[in-house]
Image: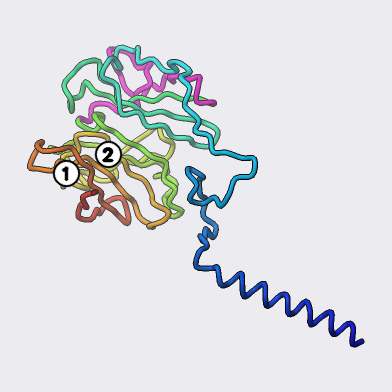
């Protein structure tokens, strides 16, 4: 019995010694909790045993999507790729050469199952160049198609008929809010602009922030009045995608 007590006491002693030394070095530990971290340098790595960090480079696999329809053309741009379930979608501006912010611009869509082979569906939503067979999901709502920027709303409280959302517009119109149940059929969330304090002469990126529990929008600003100085980025937030706060300039 004495030997058993001695053995137990010995292991208790070792446990406290280990705990003391372990806790004494806690200040030097990096607590990751349940966060996902990427090894981009040696900051999170104590040592390498037969391993190394390798910087991989992207490989050009060639063109996967041609802007070759009459309503598309050389001034297509602002591509937004969204993965919804097993399907990829890319939204982009169609502009064969007209002035920015006019009704010659449209918003087009292409779809893919693998991100490599893309199909432009004949949606028959709008008559373009005398034909209803086209991949246009928004037309005749200038200047919305100039920089229509959609996203898949991950807000758990989002309404089913507002699964997709988008902001679009110019300085003249302000940013207008659009919603869609399926990413194809779109309507304005309200008449008029939901945010006006900006120039919006680019793609205005919005999304639901899980971290902040609100909608965010990053948009183009300039460091001086009007279109002068340097191009920069501002941001605004909203609890409901309608009421947006004062802009905050990024640094």
Tell me where residue 99 sits by quadrant: top left
Judge whether residue 40 is colored magenta. no
The x and y percentages for residue 227 are 10, 36
Q: Is residue 163 left or right of residue 233?
A: right
Residue at the limit of the structure toward the bottom, as seen here = 2
The x and y percentages for residue 162 are 39, 45
At 18% from the left and 36% from the top, the residue drawn is 170
User: Who is closer to the viewer here, 56 or 90?
Assistant: 56
Label located before the other in sequence (2 or 1): 1
Above-or-below relation of 107 to 28: above
At 41% from the left and 45% from the top, the residue drawn is 153
Return the mark for residue 198.
1
Q: Are marks 2 and 1 in contact (CB under 8 Å)?
A: yes
The residue where tag 2 is placed is: 204
The x and y percentages for residue 110 are 42, 23
User: Who is closer to the viewer here, 45 or 175?
Assistant: 45
Tell me where residue 147 sits by quadrant: top left
Tell me where residue 52 sits by quadrant: top right
Report the span colored magenta. Answer: 113-142
Element at badge 2? loop
Q: Is residue 69 left or right of residue 87?
A: left
Magenta stretch: dominant secondary structure? loop
- Estimate how packed mark 2 is, as few (under 14), some (14 to 19) or many (20 or more) residues with alpha carbons within 10 Å: many
Element at badge 1? loop
- Estimate how packed mark 1 is, as few (under 14), some (14 to 19) or many (20 or more) residues with alpha carbons within 10 Å: many
The x and y percentages for residue 88 are 48, 30
């Amino acid at each position: 019995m004495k030997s058993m007590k001695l053995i137990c006491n010995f292991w208790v002693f070792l446990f406290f010694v280990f705990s003391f030394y372990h806790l004494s070095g806690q200040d030097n530990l990096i607590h990751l909790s349940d966060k996902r971290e990427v090894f981009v340098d040696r900051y999170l790595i104590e040592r390498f045993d037969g391993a190394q960090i390798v910087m991989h480079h992207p490989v050009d696999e060639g063109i996967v999507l041609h802007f070759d329809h009459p309503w598309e053309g050389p001034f297509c741009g602002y591509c937004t790729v969204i993965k919804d379930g097993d399907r990829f979608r890319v939204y982009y501006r169609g502009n064969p050469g007209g002035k920015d912010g006019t009704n010659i611009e449209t918003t087009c869509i292409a779809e893919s199952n693998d991100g490599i082979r893309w199909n432009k569906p004949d949606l028959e939503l709008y008559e373009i160049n005398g034909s209803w067979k086209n991949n246009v999901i928004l037309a005749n709502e200038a200047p919305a198609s100039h920089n229509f920027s959609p996203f898949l709303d991950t807000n758990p409280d989002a309404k089913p008929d507002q699964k997709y959302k988008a902001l679009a517009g110019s300085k003249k119109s302000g940013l207008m809010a659009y919603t869609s149940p399926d990413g194809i059929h779109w309507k304005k969330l309200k008449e008029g602009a939901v945010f006006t304090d900006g120039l919006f002469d680019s793609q205005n990126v919005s999304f639901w922030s899980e971290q902040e529990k609100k909608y965010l929008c990053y948009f183009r600003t300039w460091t001086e009045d009007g279109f002068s100085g340097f191009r920069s980025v501002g941001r605004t937030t909203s609890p409901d995608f309608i009421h947006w706060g004062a802009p905050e300039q990024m640094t």
